[in-house]
Image (cartoon, rainbow, N blue to C red):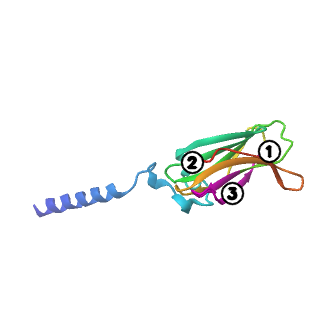
C-alpha cells in the first residue's frame, strides 16, 4: 500500500511540474518583451512568428512595411526592393515616438538592391509608444532625401 501511495505521489508531482513547462509556440517562446526588444532582431527572438503589418509606404518601388509583434510588444520595418532596375540607394527606418509625439529613437536598414528581395531592421519595443516606418533615398553625399512614411500607429 505504501509503494502504491509513493508512486501516485511521484506521478502527481511529475504531472504538476510538466504543466509548468511552456509549450513551443506559446507567448513564452519570445526572446524579449517590450523595451527589452530594443535593437534585437525579430527572427532571432522569435518575434516574427506572430507579426502583423500596420501600414505600408511605397516610395518609387522601395516599399517599407511597419511590422508589429503582439507577443513581444515590439515593432520593426521590413523593406522590399520593387524597383527594376534599382538606380538609387535607399533605406528604411522604424521610428518610435512617445505619447506627446516626440521622437524617442529610430533604427535604419538599407533596402536590398536585388529586385523583390527584402530585409528588416532590428526592433523597437514597448506598447506605450507610437511607431511609423519610413523609406528614403541617399544622395551621392550620403545625405538622406525624398523620405516618405506611414502614419503613426
Decide which of 94, 9 is in the foreground and name it: 94
Q: Quick one: SS at disc 1?
A: loop
Q: What residue do we see at 17% from left, 63% from top?
A: 6
Q: Please state if 26 lies on the left or on the right of 88 as rendered.
A: left
- For the magenta stretch, what is the residue range? 93-112
Q: Residues within 10 Å of mark 2 (few under 14, many from 20)?
A: many
Decide which of 48, 129 is in the foreground and name it: 129
Q: Distance of mark 3 from mark 2, alpha carbons?
A: 15 Å
Based on the picture, tell me whether residue 32 belongs to the magenta stretch: no
For residue 108, which quarter of the picture? bottom right
Q: Residues within 10 Å of mark 1 (few under 14, many from 20)?
A: many
Q: Are marks 3 and 2 in contact (CB under 8 Å)?
A: no
Quadrant into which the N terminus falls: bottom left
Q: Residues within 10 Å of mark 3 (few under 14, many from 20)?
A: some
Discs 1/2, front:
2
Q: Answer yes or no: is residue 23 visible.
A: yes
Q: Quick one: SS at disc 3?
A: strand
Decide which of 18, 75 is in the foreground and name it: 75
Q: Which residue is mark 1?
A: 113
Report x, y in % for residue 4: 14, 59
Q: What residue do we see at 44% from left, 50% from top?
A: 24
Q: Please state if 1 lies on the left or on the right of 36 as rendered.
A: left
Which disc is residue 107 wearing?
3
Amino acid at each position: 500500500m505504501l509503494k502504491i501511495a509513493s508512486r501516485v505521489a511521484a506521478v502527481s508531482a511529475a504531472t504538476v511540474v510538466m504543466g509548468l513547462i511552456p509549450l513551443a509556440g506559446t507567448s513564452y517562446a519570445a526572446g524579449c518583451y517590450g523595451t527589452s526588444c530594443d535593437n534585437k532582431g525579430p527572427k532571432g527572438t522569435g518575434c516574427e512568428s506572430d507579426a502583423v503589418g500596420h501600414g505600408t509606404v511605397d516610395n518609387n518601388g522601395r516599399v517599407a512595411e511597419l511590422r508589429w509583434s503582439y507577443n513581444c510588444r515590439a515593432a520593426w520595418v521590413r523593406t522590399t526592393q520593387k524597383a527594376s532596375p534599382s538606380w538609387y540607394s535607399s533605406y528604411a527606418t522604424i521610428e518610435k515616438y512617445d505619447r506627446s509625439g516626440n521622437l524617442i529613437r529610430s533604427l535604419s536598414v538599407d533596402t536590398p538592391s536585388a529586385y523583390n528581395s527584402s530585409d528588416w531592421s532590428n526592433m523597437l519595443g514597448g506598447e506605450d509608444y507610437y511607431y511609423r516606418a519610413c523609406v528614403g533615398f541617399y544622395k551621392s553625399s550620403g545625405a538622406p532625401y525624398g523620405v516618405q512614411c506611414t502614419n503613426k500607429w
